[in-house]
């Protein structure tokens, strides 16, 4: 008697992307799409309700309930998902990536990372590997991860990335402190660490280098 197919929840804010993924997955034996959404908050709810085995998570989902400043980075949403549904396995999907993004996804609890231009076989392999308790990385993602591990630069923390994002929006230290519920002194300390880790000496340089490394995105 064959086992039940793996239930897949699709999380991507592009309807056409979800339609393409659904068509691919539904044709693959042993896999089945149990739901889909483009919204981060809905993803957490659906993962609980549908008891999905694997969540295919877009790198930048939207969040209709989180307000204009909601954290919708795929790694942050993955962290929320894993906290709410510890049994779920998240595989991150990205149209482009860097070593730092792969690292952040894995640190957040993702069990796989696949580029959207990868062959379907790599996606299916990542899904099955993640569902079986392994780490399913597409070859390019694995290469980026190894390269990041070998890089001499220090890792920028999640809190420091939050500070950089607010820097990129032009906020002052006082405004950043208010937004993150920190003291101005703590913000200044974070900036000192950011400048050292990114090898820059000012706010503009830190934002520019963070964008170059793929730590933050403008716009």
Image (tube, rainbow, N blue to C red):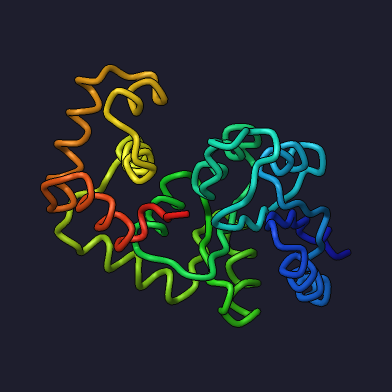
Which quarter of the figure has residue 142? bottom left
Which residue shows up at 62% across the image and 51% down it?
Answer: 61
Quadrant showing the N terminus: bottom right
**As displayed, is residue 139 above or below residue 48?**
below
x then y, percent, for residue 124:
65, 72
Which residue is at 27% across, 28% downward? 173
Q: Residue farthest to the right?
A: 1
Query: Is 160 on the left-hand or right-hand side of 94?
Result: left
Numbered marks: total: 0
Horizontal arrangement in the rendering, residue 75 relative to residue 202 (left or right): right
Compared with 1, 204 (above or below) is: above
**44 and 192: which is toward the camera:** 192
Q: Where residue 178 sits in the image (x, y, percent)? A: 38, 20
Residue 35: x and y, percent?
82, 53
Task: Residue 213: give x, y in percent of width and height.
Answer: 30, 61
Depicted 64 relative to depicted 121: above or below = above
Q: Quadrant of residue 187?
A: top left
Q: Is residue 27 above or below residue 81?
A: below
Q: Classify residue 116 by image quadrant.
A: bottom right
Residue at point 60%, 58% (across, down): 58
């Amino acid at each position: 008697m064959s086992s039940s197919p793996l239930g897949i929840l699709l999380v991507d804010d592009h309807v056409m992307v979800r339609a393409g993924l659904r068509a691919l997955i539904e044709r693959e034996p042993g896999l089945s799409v149990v739901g889909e959404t483009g919204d981060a908050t809905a993803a957490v709810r659906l993962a609980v309700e549908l008891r999905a085995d694997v969540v295919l998570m877009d790198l930048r989902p939207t969040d209709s309930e989180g307000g204009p400043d909601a954290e919708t980075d795929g790694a942050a949403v993955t962290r929320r998902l894993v906290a709410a549904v510890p049994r779920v396995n998240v595989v991150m999907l990205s149209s482009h990536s860097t070593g730092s993004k792969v690292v952040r996804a894995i640190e957040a609890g993702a069990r796989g990372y696949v580029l959207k231009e990868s062959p379907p076989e790599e996606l299916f392999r990542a899904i099955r590997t993640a569902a079986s308790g392994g780490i399913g990385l597409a070859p390019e993602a694995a290469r980026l991860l190894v390269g990041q591990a070998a890089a001499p630069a220090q890792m920028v923390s999640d809190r420091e990335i939050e500070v950089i994002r607010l820097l990129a929006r032009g906020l002052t230290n006082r405004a950043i402190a208010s937004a993150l519920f920190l003291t101005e002194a703590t913000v200044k300390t974070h900036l000192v660490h950011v400048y050292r880790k990114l090898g820059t000496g000012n706010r503009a340089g830190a934002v520019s280098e963070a964008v170059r490394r793929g730590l933050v995105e403008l716009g």
